[in-house]
Amino acid sequence: MEHRDADFNIMLATDSYKVTHYKQYPPNTSKVYSYFECREKRTDPTKSRKVKYDKTVFYGLQYILHKYLKGKVVTPEKIQEAKEVYREHFQDDVFNEKGWTYILEKYNGHLPIEIKAVPEGSVIPRGNVLFTVESTDPECYWLTNWVETAGIGASAHLVNFKGTDTVAGIGVIKKYYGTKDPVPGFSVPAAEHSTITAWGKDHEKDAFEHIIKQFPSVPVSIVSDSYDIYNACEKIWGEDLRGLIEKRSADAPLVVRPDSGNPLDTVLKVLEILGKKFSPEENSKGFKVLPPYIRVIQGDGVDINTLQEIVEGMKEHRWSIENIAFGSGGALLQKLTRDLLNCSFKCSYVVTNGLGVNVFKDPVADPNKRSKKGRLSLHRTQSGDFVTLEEGKGDLEEYGVDLLHTVFQNGKIVKTYTFDEVRDNAKLKESELEELLH
């Protein structure tokens, strides 16, 4: 049974910056493999917490597959719609029309991806893989991380802001409210961790250089904390690629994006390093301003409180507010966010030039954000504990059955669960109940 809204367009149901990612992966990439987990967060034992969520009930993927991903989701009309929206949104032709047309013509609009997941209703300790997504066609490597975002439509923030990465919100405004403004929200090309880590740790500079050369005439935001944000600012941006940065115009600045660590401390240290490498000027009020070809954006941990702390901290250290932009995702739109359980969707394996490579992120400022490497599998030990095996080690027979089952393949749902099965999977086992009671 088809439950999808006829107006739904998978090509618009993503974060804006993902639209440009097909240009950012290493040349000759033929596969991207990513996974979802609720990261295990190490907490300070001296701090009391009323509730500690150390397990996750996995539920809802089947709904998403039925509503948004199964069947023919790509049509000529929707390709044209997406092309027009992104042309307005970016003020440039960055949409991967060729890639989506390939999916339409070769797969009749079905998505060439495979999704494996734990059974719905399973109660899994944090820190374990819950599902994986991988491309099944070498021409569609870029599709894996496209489907990360469930674009159901947050538009309320566009009442007050014109910069947005929530493309689905633009559709809501146009279709259900109407507006005289032909472009309710703008965005710019931006990197994510997968388009950096896919190059490998030793080639971070190559990734940065490749991306800024792809977008020479528009602002481009590059997440720079995959390994060491401070080394990236000092060595890569401040030395290795300094000449390229200085050639950019004020209309097309490099925007350096830290994404881990204490927001205030990180912003101040990043500004300090960039200030030593790119001579700032002093404005009429006596505050330091970086050259117009380089700026900073802080999106990690930003809410109304931390934003004020960052602004006050910058003021105290005599940095002008024009050096920085702020981004806020879940905290702005729902506040009941992925951060509650530290939900994370990250690339862990790519095939480039025919060679499979295990990739990961490991931010120096936040060990909690280290991601897993390689192809993953989920197993249960003899003692009943769950364990995630990395780097394809689960392929060895000694580890037993992989608890991740293929549920979606090339546009078709191949395994489903009844709600009774979901409830049964979520029930406490007798042994677990006994442990709680005693």
Image (cartoon, rainbow, N blue to C red):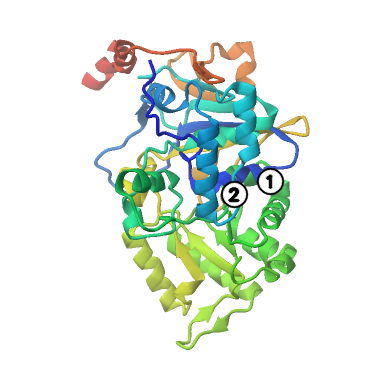
**Residue 320: x, y in percent?**
47, 77
Q: Which residue is mark 1?
A: 201
> Is residue 372 visible from the viewing direction of this image?
no
**Quadrant including the C terminus:** top left
Tell me if 83 is positioned left or right of 200 in this view. Answer: left
Image quarter for residue 277?
A: bottom right
Q: Amino acid at mark 1?
A: Lys
Where residue 132 appears, as percent x and y from the top left, is 53, 26
Which of 284/86 is in front?
A: 86
In depth, the one of 348 and 416 nearer the eye is 416
The residue closer to the viewer here, 368 or 15, is: 15
In this picture, is 203 found above or below 148? below
Mark drawn on residue 418: none
Residue at 48% across, 73% down: 322
| Image position, residue 402 (x, y; %) | 53, 15
**Number of on-image labels:** 2
Q: Identify which residue is drawn at 42% across, 36% down.
A: 150
> Which amino acid type corresponds to the residue marked 2 in the rendered image?
Ser
Mark 2: few, some, or many residues within 10 Å (few <14, many ≥20)?
Answer: many
Name the residue tied to disc 2: 226
Mark 2 and mark 1 in contact (Cβ < 8 Å)? yes
Q: Residue at x 67, y 53 (%)?
A: 211
Mark 2 lies on a secondary structure that is loop
Q: Earlier in the sequence, mark 1 or mark 2?
A: 1
- In which quadrant of the rendered image does the N terminus lie? top left
Tell me residue 233's x, y (percent).
62, 63
Q: How far is disc 1 from disc 2 in space, using C-alphas? A: 8 Å
Can you name the residue that lies furthest to the left here? Answer: 437
Q: Is residue 243 left or right of residue 296?
A: right
Q: Residue at x 30, y 48 (%)?
A: 177
Q: Is residue 407 above or below residue 372?
A: above
